[in-house]
Amino acid sequence: MSLSKLEDINLNQLENYSKDININYISSLKLSNYRNYKSYKASFDKYPIAFVGKNGVGKTNILESISLMQPGRGIRSVKLEEMSYKYSGNFGININLKKNEESFKIGSSLDLEVSKLRKVKVDGKYISPLLLTKYLAVISLTPLMDKIFIEGSTNRRRFFDKISWIFISSHAQNIRLYEKSIKERNNLLKDNSNDAIWFNNIEKQIVKYGTQIIIDRFKVLNILNAQIKDSTANFPKASMVFTGEIENTFSENSDLDYFKDFFSKTLYEKRKQDFYRGSTSIGPHKADLLVTYKEKDMKASLCSTGEQKSLLISIILSVAKSYKKYTNLSPILLLDEVFSHLDNDKKQSLSKEIENLKSQAFMTGIDESDFVTFNKDSCIINLDDSTNRSANEF
Ligand SMILES: Nc1ncnc2c1ncn2[C@@H]1O[C@H](COP(=O)(O)OP(=O)(O)OP(=O)(O)O)[C@@H](O)[C@H]1O
Ligand SMILES: [Mg+2]
């Protein structure tokens, strides 16, 4: 079968979303034993919410708890036990999700006495955390991402994969299965195994899941680049490409069978070299996401701190807009300390973009005045004195 790899870029066909869904927000949040909260309860409207308060009051912790409504280990990417109140070994996060006429109760919990893994329940039924993207999409931007263009490629891949799985929910599962196969091949290499059948079987899995990961990353990449190109937002335009030995071959050849063959042969040929390295040297786990500030034709890694932040915002906005375009749902945004670092012009632009998206954005800041650019529907929750009011009531 010869198939042009990217001709089916149509997310409406990839996921069976209904076109008439347009309300999508978290109406309540309940934390038990989570980080600094023995217990915390809040109800929200569908509009942007700003958590303000002193350093250490627990603003980022609330955003992190919402980020656990996606696959993975949340915006800080740390061990689950660190998230339990004083490392007690168990926590619970419960939300009510309103999705048009429907309503879902989603719970994410840890009980180390029972399992090291977190358990996720939707309306009382256990589901794999990898399937959470079927219910909601959460897009986050935190200060931990400030160095994303400068540091090693791992976090850039992770950043992009988190974006990809909100569009294509099987991406999370494919990443998990691919990583498992790579680990198995690395173990074979370490054991200096010459079990050809075992090698062949594992490499077959690597090619299967690896190819799908590359296809899906490229699909999402094309969608986002197109969105950014047409963007009228007051943020610098980013352009993104995936680079890597295997990705370059993928881009150059339109025949999928040829590509899979090439991937498979390369893995076979590299067995000896990889044995000396002690790890698998080719595959999408080695890819890098290269981001460029388009108007300046400048690599993001060479841009100023403020420019890098603006590029990230531009990418996040393109994700949110594309997601809305293809699913008719507004994604939930987590914006930790984003507004405090923007000049007034950019604050104005970003708040307008969020309002136009009709996204429920959970934001944090030290000062209430960071959020004056939001309209009266938005809400400020002051964690110092636990008063809630709309953003422009000062
Ligand atoms: N497992 C835990 N158990 C109890 N407290 C914790 C746990 N993990 C973190 N904390 C505490 O939670 C508090 C709030 O942290 P958080 O990062 O949410 O603060 P913040 O309001 O975002 O502050 P900042 O303005 O400095 O960013 C901190 O004092 C931190 O030490
Ligand atoms: Mg914080």
Image (spheres, helix red, strand yellow):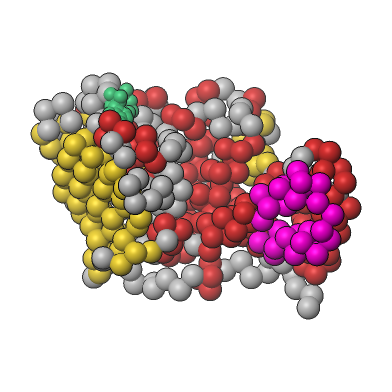
Q: Is residue 189 visible?
A: yes
Q: Please say if 12 is above or below 390.
A: below
Q: Quadrant of residue 250?
A: bottom right
Image position, residue 184 (x, y; %): 68, 53
Q: Is residue 178 magenta?
A: no
> In this picture, which residue range is highlighted in magenta?
181-209
Image position, residue 378 (x, y; %): 21, 43
Q: Is residue 202 magenta?
A: yes
Q: Main secondary structure of the magenta part?
A: helix
Q: Residue at x 74, y 70 (%)?
A: 4
Image position, residue 48 (x, y; %): 26, 44
Q: Please say if 260 is above or below 224.
A: below
Q: Nearer the viewer, residue 143 or 348?
A: 143
Q: Quadrant of residue 385?
A: top left
- In-image side of 298 versus 270 (left or right): left
Q: Nearer the viewer, residue 83 or 360?
A: 83
Q: Residue at x 29, y 43 (%)?
A: 90
* Residue farthest along the bottom direction in this orientation: 1
Image position, residue 17 (x, y; %): 42, 71
Q: Please give the count of numbered marks on the rendered protein.
A: 0
Q: Please say if 281 is above or below 305.
A: below
